[in-house]
Image (tube, rainbow, N blue to C red):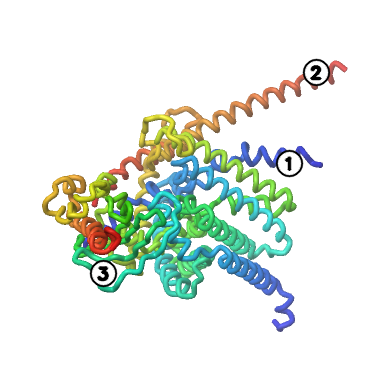
Amino acid sequence: MTFKEFLKSKTFKCIIVLTTIALVCGGLLAILNDVLYISEEEKTQKAIKKIYGKDMEYTVVQIDEQDKTNKYGQIEAIYAFKDGNYLIQATGIDGYQSGTITAWVVAEFKDGKFNGLNSVSEASNEKQTLMSKFNKDFVNVYVNKDREGVINGKYFNLYDSDKEIGNISSGATKSTNAYNNAVNCALYYIREKLDGGK
Amino acid sequence: MGTFLMIIIMAVFANNFILVQFLGICPFLGLSKSRANAFGMGVAVTLIMTITCLITYPIYMYILVPLKLEYLEIIVFIFVIAALVQMIENIIKRFSPALYKGMGIYLPLITTNCAVLGVAELVIDSAAMANLIGVPQMSLGYSVLYGFFGGVGFTVAIILLSGLREKTDYLDIPKSLKGFPITMVAACIMAMGFYVFNFIG
Amino acid sequence: MNWSKYKNIATNGVLKNNPIFRLVLGTCPTLALTGSALNAFGMGLAVTFILTLSNTFISLLRKVIPDEVRIPAYVLIIATLVTIIRMLLEKYIPVLFESFGVYLPLIVVNCIILGRAEGFANKNPIFDSALDGFFTGIGCTLAMGLMGIVREFLGAGSFFGMQLMDFRIEFFTSAAGAFFVYGMFIAIFNAAYKAIENKINKKNFALHLEELSIKENN
């Protein structure tokens, strides 16, 4: 078959048509992908809306290097809301198989003073296979408006002492530990850095 | 070993592709009339699902993600699967005509099988997948294993249903319940059985 | 205007060849997403959107695409449309995007869409094809929505997320309940359809007899 014959053949037509369609589709998708791109900021905004329950203007709080880690874990990010409350993303260590749990902690502030925990929810985890055993009641144990109790470390030794939590998440004590550490990590930062307008 | 067992339990039972995730229902209903057909389809699907995972996972992780072309994922996957099915069909036809006779007729149907595209899409959601089978990070090996045992789960479900259907065909039931409706009810009872596996782990 | 033809296309898509209840196609999303009415309607509308556009484009290109490569070409067009709707949902309706999960890309291998492309769009003019796609999609949406409403009400006591009653029979929102409700719906729909068809046939037959007797009398 000569080149000219090939140009007239059916195979050639098939290839041309398919390539054209593929190029048009690909180009269209590339353009739309640019137009409909969701930026990181938008993603954060959406995540915050989901956790906080409503749209809220926020600023990202800069964390000093030495305050990033404490004995409970690591502070990942802090968002200060316009209404005075804070959202803290903290990772607790010492979970099952030395894994971790990262939690969102919403801390309520009144006139610059810490007032209690509004909500706690899981962001992600590492190696914690029994997370399905955790129910809503478990997380609600942390939600507390008793400022003195919370700030003075009500949850600091829950893993050993408080039967309340052990009963709710029976069978996943190691993961409970990591969850406690995540909440405590956030509380530690609040006590040291945020409470009373420090 | 623990992870291996976890993948088997999750893929075959607790997250059975047909009865829990509803992937691959069309062949489940269409080809479960006889046990031989069900087995042939099951083996073919398992084969394709395993190889699909082996190919699509690296394509997504090492080509599409670095090039920021994630949006082409659906198109790429469906063409990989179509090409793969065609290739396997030719290979089997060439080297084992006996095997081709057995499962060749099912192969063209697999391109439009939800379970195959489904598994390709599921394993690239690394975070959710790693969580499901309890490993720190998803890897090619895990995704291939998940694909293989997902296919085994598909085969188990379709063979079980074919056994039930051989009986339900002779039941004395109202005419409007014959065919699909009674098959659905049989599948419903099977799904209840598989629900129990959710409490493992 | 050819009203009877359009009416025919519409009744075909919604009733006679209802893809969910009569042809039992596209079963995967039907079973998986009818646990809540909102998801079911959302999925139905997504399918309608894609079906209408895919039928339009395929009908538009039916004389250009050679027969030998028509299936890859159709799949390419459908996959592009699915990717587009996926981007749109992720940007503007993230709630639906999340609850659709893996079933959103799986629209590509939904038998209804390729079936209508093969069975209708590649032989018919553009407007008819678009109409056919639209009404088949509406048939899908209505069937899935109905199942979603029933399952959500029985399983959670709510209607589109609004709590109406304080009871829940969790069986109906579970995987097993999906199969059961779908089976019952197919049975009821087919029984009703047959009954109506019989009635119409009888009526036509009676009319036919009347005509015959009139002719004989003359």
Give above or below for A10 relative to C157: below
Count residues near mark 3 (Cα–Cα under 10 Å), then give few for <14, some for 14-19, many for 20+.
few
Residue sitting farthest toward the left: A161
Please give the chain letter of the residue carrying mark 3.
Answer: A
Can you tell which mark lies on residue C213?
Answer: 2
Judge depth for marks 2 and 1 and give the one in front: 1
The quarter of the picture where the N terminus of chain C appears is top right
The quarter of the picture where the C terminus of chain C appears is top right
Please give the chain letter of the residue carrying mark 1.
Answer: C
Residue picked out by circle 1: C6
Coordinates of residue B114 in the picture (x, y in percent): 47, 54
Coordinates of residue C16 in the picture (x, y in percent): 62, 37
In screen coordinates, is B131 left or right of C9? left
Which amino acid type corresponds to the residue marked 2 in the rendered image? Ser
- Is disc 3 placed on a helix, strand or loop? helix
Give above or below for A84 relative to A135: below
- Is disc 2 placed on a helix, strand or loop? helix
Give above or below for C128 relative to A71: above
Q: CA distance from mark 3 to mark 1?
A: 71 Å
> Same chain for the residues at labels 2 and 1, yes or no?
yes
Is residue C162 something one can see in this rendering? yes
Report the front residue among B23 and B169.
B23
Name the N-terminal-most of marks 2 and 1.
Answer: 1
Q: CA distance from mark 3 to mark 2?
A: 99 Å
> Same chain for the residues at labels 3 and 1, yes or no?
no
Which amino acid type corresponds to the residue marked 1 in the rendered image? Tyr
Residue sitting farthest toward the top: C217
Count residues near mark 1 (Cα–Cα under 10 Å), then give few for <14, some for 14-19, many for 20+.
some
Residue at 14%, 55% in the rendered image: A157
Is residue B178 something one can see in this rendering? no
